[in-house]
Image: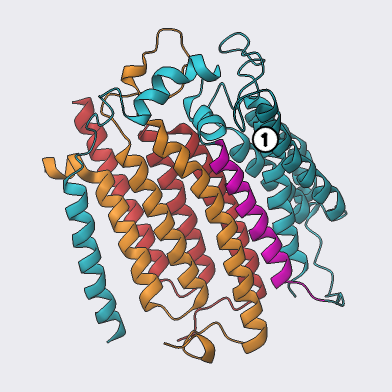
Chain colours: A cyan, B red, C orange
Amino acid sequence: MRSLIAVILLAVIGLGLALCLSDMPFGANHIATAEKAGRHYLEKAPQETGSANVVTAVVVTYRGFDTLGEVTVLFIAAIGLGMVLYRRKKQEGKPPQPASFVLQTGCCFLFPLILILGVYIFLHGHLTPGGGFQGGVIVASGFLLAYIGCADMKIRHRWFEATESLAGSAFVIAGMAGLAAGGSFLMNFMPKGNFNTLFSAGIIPIIYIAIGLKVGAELTGLIANLLERAE
Amino acid sequence: MLATVQNCMVIALTVLMLAGAVCACIFKDLISAVIATAFVSLLAALFFFLLHAPDVAMAEASIGAALTTAIFVIAIKKTARSEEE
Amino acid sequence: MSFLFENSYYIAAVGLILIGLYIMAAKKNLIKVIIGLSFFETGINVLLIAAGYIRGGSAPIFSHPDMQAGKMVDPTPQALVLTAIVIGVAVLALALSLAVRLYEHHGTLNLRKIRELKW
């Protein structure tokens, strides 16, 4: 009975979606006219922000306030997870069985390489695909690997919390500096530099480094909480 | 010719993706269902790449296929592994 | 056949959304419901990116001097989806931590057996 109701509901929703999509042919050039936002971003972003990657320019400058709200949501989710899993007295479970020698050596060998990859990706966010979010997630997955694989590795929560708060403050301070330099929150007030080189695009690399560190620390803390706090 | 081959490939990937999703729906073992979820995420990342969105493809591949799977597996380890009726 | 060729991305997206909704509505296990939520989210992301695609366009990155802005796909949905994916993983982790806590309280993940969530 329950699944029958579900199927009828799904048929209605699917029909509605199909009707909506029939108005929107796949692959049509829907940003052909000049007043569309996508057209403006594509044409003006290289001059206005100096960033070769237009998606980065949209995420960090045009929609930078949205991104600030997004890292706030991430922060709130991490706090919520810590609160839900909080328990006052720490009960020591039985220690996990250590991994085999080959696995431990492999994890400890791969860990710095994964960190370097993550840092590379968020440093080059304005030139190549990638950026703060992707690099931060790769850093976090490197820490996850080390946490599971290397037996003697302990995650020091205090350090991650400090990194995260510093990076979050750096984001807000960079935005405020734009306000102080005359203009608006998150205005790109620094020199743009040579297009398509590492030192270009003004405050975009700085903000993306801050986002990368914040996302990496946040997700590492989230996973460590999930691994340690729950019994 | 090339376009036709590419179209057929996309259709094959679509079928694989939906089959993976249905598998995740019917598997009784939750770890298997989570692995099917990771497979669907990986194919979604491939779709994003084919749609010329490399930034999103990178995010989906590293989050959907790696971190989400890890979080699910940790949570299943702390609870029950099989889906009881 | 040409309908399939034209709309295969849309079909994949809508199919994922419907499968995710079905899992959320019909399954009783809480972890399965969260898996359905993640399918739903992936489906919506694919739908948004497919709506922003322009035939013959390239990725919106000026990696080469002679690339033209007129021959690129729409960057706006890509920026939206990028942030949505990262929020999605945080929401999933929060939901799973709630599931772990519920299991500790009730000893089961079956939604029918957990009184408070019955409908």
Residue A145 lies, in percent from the top left, at 72, 50
Q: Secondary structure at mark 1?
A: helix
Tell whether position A67 is magenta.
Answer: yes
Magenta span includes B27: no
Name the residue rendered at 68%, 65% in the picture: A81
Judging by the rendered image, the residue that carries numbered circle 1 is A118
Residue closer to the observer: B4 or A173: A173
| Residue at x-position 21% and y-position 68% | A11
Q: Nearer the viewer, residue C4 or A10?
A: A10
Look at the image and give the residue range highlighted in magenta: A64-87
A78 or A95: which is nearer to us? A78
The image quadrant that residue A9 belongs to is bottom left
Instruction: Locate residue A32, reporting x and y percent.
Output: 25, 24
Three-letter code for the amino acid on which mark 1 is drawn: Gly
Q: Picture coordinates of residue A31 (x, y %)?
A: 28, 28
Decide: is A86 above or below A218: below
Q: Residues within 10 Å of mark 1 (few under 14, many from 20)?
A: many
Does B41 sit above or below residue C33? Answer: above
The quadrant of the picture occupied by the C terminus of chain A is bottom right
Q: Is residue C2 above or below residue C58?
A: below
